[in-house]
Image (cartoon, rainbow, N blue to C red):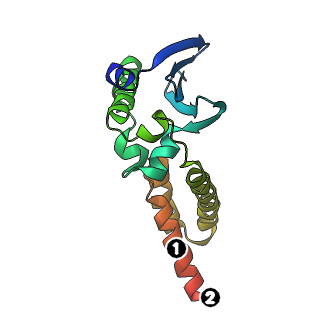
Amino acid sequence: MLEGIEKYHFLQGRRNGDVVTLSNPHCIIYLQNFGEGIGFKFAAIGDPETKFSLSKYLDAFVDGGKQGNCPEPPQELDLEQQFVYVLKGFNSVLISDKLAAPLDGDFSWVPKQKAFNEEYERLDLKLDDLLEIDESEYFPIWVKKDDGDPTWMDDVRRILAEQESKS
């Protein structure tokens, strides 16, 4: 992640167990090693307790969402190779400017993120309802969601609109 760290002038903070922090004058990044994955959250330097998920940010604001910009590593890689793969993905996001707003201190997008999160949760509940109504629609959408493909939300919206037009 060296390129991204240098681009945004990040300094490594202290390690706290399995969490490493990187910070610049505007933003803090929290990288957490889960053993079988790496979490990436970030926060405004002035509000370090309000953390935002990289994947939710990408899904809400960047074409292709998390899966298109920071995909999961292939399962055939060993754990160390998967770890490196994920860090390279994080670096690509950093150097691409897709996270430029928060890294430069612009958190004006937060209300839109909150609205996205609420819509995500609402549609997630509706997806569960689909299982009871139409299993053939449910499973392909669930697979998309599980794969990190944000278009699953559009599919649920379409089905809800179809149901509403029938009633």
Q: Quadrant of the N terminus?
A: top left
Residue 99 visible to the viewer: no
The residue tagged with tag 2: helix, strand or loop? Answer: loop
Q: Is residue 55 above or below residue 151?
A: above
Q: Which amino acid does label 1 sit on?
A: Ile
Q: Residue at x 40, y 49 (%)?
A: 62
Residue placed most toward the observer, 43 or 88: 43
Spot occupied by residue 163 in the image (x, y as percentages of width and height): 57, 80
Residue placed most toward the observer, 75 or 57: 57
Residue 20 visible to the viewer: yes
Q: Distance between the residues labelled 1 and 2?
A: 13 Å
Left or right of 111, for residue 139: left
Q: In this view, does 163 lie above or below 88?
A: below
Question: Residue at label 2?
Answer: 167
Residue placed most toward the observer, 116 or 74: 116
The residue tagged with tag 1: helix, strand or loop? Answer: helix
Spot occupied by residue 97 in the image (x, y as percentages of width and height): 35, 38
Q: How dense is the environment of label 1, judged by Cα within 10 Å: few (below 14), some, or many (20 and up)?
A: some
Q: What residue type is labelled 2?
A: Ser
Mark positioned earlier in the residue sequence (1 or 2): 1
Left or right of 124, for residue 58: left
Left or right of 122, for residue 29: left
Spot occupied by residue 16 in the image (x, y as percentages of width and height): 62, 13
Q: Which mark is residue 159?
A: 1
Q: In which quarter of the image is residue 46?
A: top right
Spot occupied by residue 129 in the image (x, y as percentages of width and height): 64, 65
Q: Quadrant of residue 99?
A: top left
Q: Which residue is drawn at 64% across and 61% down?
A: 122
Q: How dense is the environment of label 2, judged by Cα within 10 Å: few (below 14), some, or many (20 and up)?
A: few
**Count of picture labels:** 2
